[in-house]
Image (cartoon, helix red, strand yellow):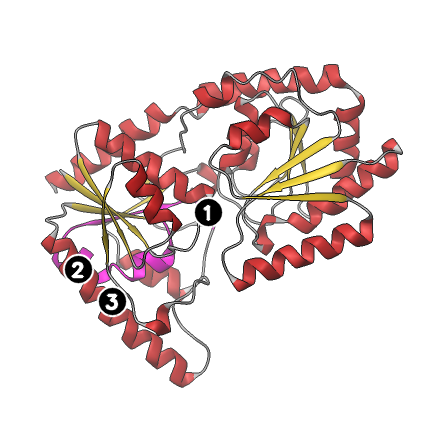
């Protein structure tokens, strides 16, 4: 079976994109042929090529080169122009899928699914795997009609996204993280891994570290691993820097790295105070590295972090409580180590990649039979 992954945001690499590539790679190892289709060249397509995937580019009109949550611009004229461009791109993508003799297409965002409506109708079934809680009203319902099968990657997504056909928990290759030597971990280093989007709560991470500093009466370092690829992301990084200056928190912007394991090897704790999430890849990786996690209770976070067992879960926006938990872990290395071990055991039991790949192989078989 020839499976395509369609990418509509070529400008960066994020956790969800890495999960997509890992899924496609697993399907390839299971005996399927695989290709990555993107609307432009960029870091994601280059990453796909580097690990041996065939790639193809379907250029989209300039009016669609705006990578927010929708494909529609503001104003009547803007909406008409972008809607026409979206229809044209639909047919271009469908033609390319036909040329590539694709049997099924994977997509992981509303925007990408909306650009695959024609493909789903006349070329090959589209499988939309939903990684984050999202409901944009009519836009979500329209996207649902553009996919043959809708798969949620967590129970939390299933509870908030109507019309899902399957729930398949996310799975990762954990060996690079479970084998880390953390003897050289830095006791005052708090790590945050994620893109510069407001929903990731990076400003709250800064406030939480500031609260922990006041409790511990010493300076800490917050290291943020994440790329900056768009004007909106640059603006968010500036907001984080301004908050850090105001709170007197030492923030290190590490940029994007392929070697997240090396970053985790140095960290004492991982903090992730997002306002909206799916199943955060960074938290699974952190737990696999035996690092305690402080995270907000959104999306499927609670399925990764068990409160007071593998880390701490706080209410979204409660950076005071998060700061208290950071301080507690940094002041008690034995507690931190115990929680880290519990976290490693938990993710090994629930988030291994083999289960996710097997489930998607079954879904592809069902789609092919139907």
Label 3: how many Cα within 10 Å (few below 14, some 14–19, many 20+)? many
Left or right, residue 69 beside residue 148: right
Separation (CA) of disc 1 from disc 3: 25 Å
Q: Is residue 96 above or below residue 254?
A: below
Q: Magenta residues, as a range?
A: 108-133
Residue shown at 59% from the left, 24% from the top? 265
Residue 336 place in picture, x, y as percent: 70, 20
Q: Nearer the viewer, mark 2 or mark 1?
A: 2
Residues at circles 2 and 1 in contact by the CB criterion of under 8 Å: no
Most distant residue in the bottom direction: 77
The residue singled out by tag 1 in the image is 132
Left or right, residue 64 beside residue 180: left
Residue sitting nearer the eye, 152 or 190: 190
Tag of residue 94: 2
Tag of residue 89: 3
Is disc 3 placed on a helix, strand or loop? Answer: helix
Residues at circles 1 and 3 in contact by the CB criterion of under 8 Å: no
> Which mark sits nearer the N-terminus, 1 or 3?
3
């Amino acid at each position: 079976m020839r499976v395509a992954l369609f990418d509509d945001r070529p400008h960066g690499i994020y956790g969800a994109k890495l999960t997509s590539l890992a899924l496609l790679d697993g399907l390839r190892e299971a005996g399927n042929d695989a290709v990555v289709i993107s609307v432009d060249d960029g870091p994601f397509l280059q990453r796909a090529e580097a690990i041996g995937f065939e790639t193809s580019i379907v250029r989209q009109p300039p009016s669609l080169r705006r990578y927010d949550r929708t494909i529609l611009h503001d104003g009547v004229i803007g909406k008409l122009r972008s809607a026409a461009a979206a229809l044209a791109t639909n047919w271009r993508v469908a033609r390319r899928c036909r040329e590539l003799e694709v049997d099924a297409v994977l997509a992981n965002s509303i925007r990408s699914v909306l650009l695959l409506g024609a493909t789903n109708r006349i070329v090959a079934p589209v499988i939309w795997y939903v990684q984050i809680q999202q409901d944009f009203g009519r836009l979500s319902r329209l996207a649902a009609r553009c996919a043959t099968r809708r798969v949620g990657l967590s129970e939390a997504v299933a509870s908030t996204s109507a019309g899902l056909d399957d729930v398949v928990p996310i799975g990762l290759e954990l060996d690079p993280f479970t084998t880390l030597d953390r003897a050289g971990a830095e006791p005052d280093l708090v790590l945050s891994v994620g893109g510069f989007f407001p929903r990731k709560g990076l400003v709250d991470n800064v406030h939480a570290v500031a609260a922990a500093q006041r409790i511990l009466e010493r300076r800490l370092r917050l290291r943020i691993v994440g790329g900056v690829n768009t004007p909106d992301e640059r603006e968010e990084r500036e907001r984080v820097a301004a908050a850090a200056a105001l709170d007197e928190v030492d923030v290190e912007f590490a940029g994007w790295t392929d070697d997240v394991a090396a970053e985790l090897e140095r960290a004492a704790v991982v903090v992730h105070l997002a306002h909206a999430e799916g199943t955060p890849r960074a938290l699974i990786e952190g737990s696999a590295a035996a690092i305690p996690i402080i995270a907000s209770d959104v999306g499927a976070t609670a399925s990764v972090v068990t409160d007071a067992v593998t880390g701490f879960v706080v209410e979204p926006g409660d950076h005071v409580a998060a700061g208290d938990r950071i301080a507690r872990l940094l002041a008690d290395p034995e507690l931190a180590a115990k929680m880290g071990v519990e976290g490693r055991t938990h993710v090994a039991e629930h988030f291994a990649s083999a289960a996710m790949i097997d489930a998607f192989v079954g879904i592809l078989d069902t789609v092919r039979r139907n």
